[in-house]
Amino acid sequence: MKKLFKSIALLCAVLGLTFVAVGCGQTKPDYTAKTAESSLNAGKDLEGKTVKFKVTAYEPASFFGYNMETGKHLNFVSQDNPKVKKGDTVTVKIKKVTSTMGSFIITYSNLQKN
């Protein structure tokens, strides 16, 4: 009986640690592409916030650098190659947002492929 109890306790501990480990790396983003674009259009400051979006177009040699496009006017740009392709879903942390000719140019950090 004691062996059975120890086995069940060990199994529960292992399962508990597994669930904790799986959940640790996943945090809910602050915005989606749609909610981020609406907030930016309303004049909100999103610096430091996270956005999860699907890359609808990817321009590796744009004027601003590597450009991941999403939404109507969102351009997530970096000087470093994000190694993504059209259709990938990513989460980024916004560093800076500027508005140029009706589009938002957003620099980011902490790119995570989802």
Image: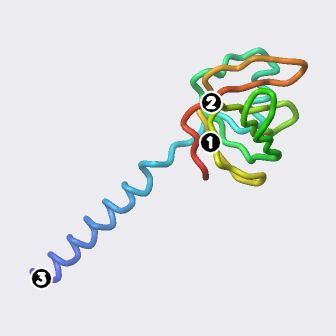
Snapshot quadrant of residue 19: bottom left
The image position of residue 110, as x and y in percent, is 54, 37
Q: Distance between the residues labelled 1 and 3?
A: 46 Å
Mark 2, Cα crowd under 10 Å, few <14 / some 14-19 / many 20+, is many
Residue 41 x, y percent position in the rendering: 82, 21
- Along the line of sight, which residue is nearer the eye, 109 or 53? 109
Which residue is at a point 56% across and 42% down the rendered structure image? 28
**Which residue is tagged 2?**
108
Q: Mark 1 points at which residue?
A: 91
Q: Earlier in the sequence, mark 1 or mark 2?
A: 1
Does residue 84 lie above or below 75 as drawn?
below
Amino acid at dot 1: Thr
Q: Residues within 10 Å of mark 1 (few under 14, many from 20)?
A: many
> Which one is closest to the eye, mark 1 or mark 2?
2
The amino acid type of the residue labelled 3 equals Lys
Quarter of the picture holding the N terminus: bottom left
Query: Mark 1 or 3 closer to N-term?
Result: 3
Between marks 1 and 2, how big is the CA–CA gap?
A: 10 Å
The x and y percentages for residue 96 are 65, 20
Which disc, if any, is residue 3?
Answer: 3
Q: What element carries label 3?
A: helix
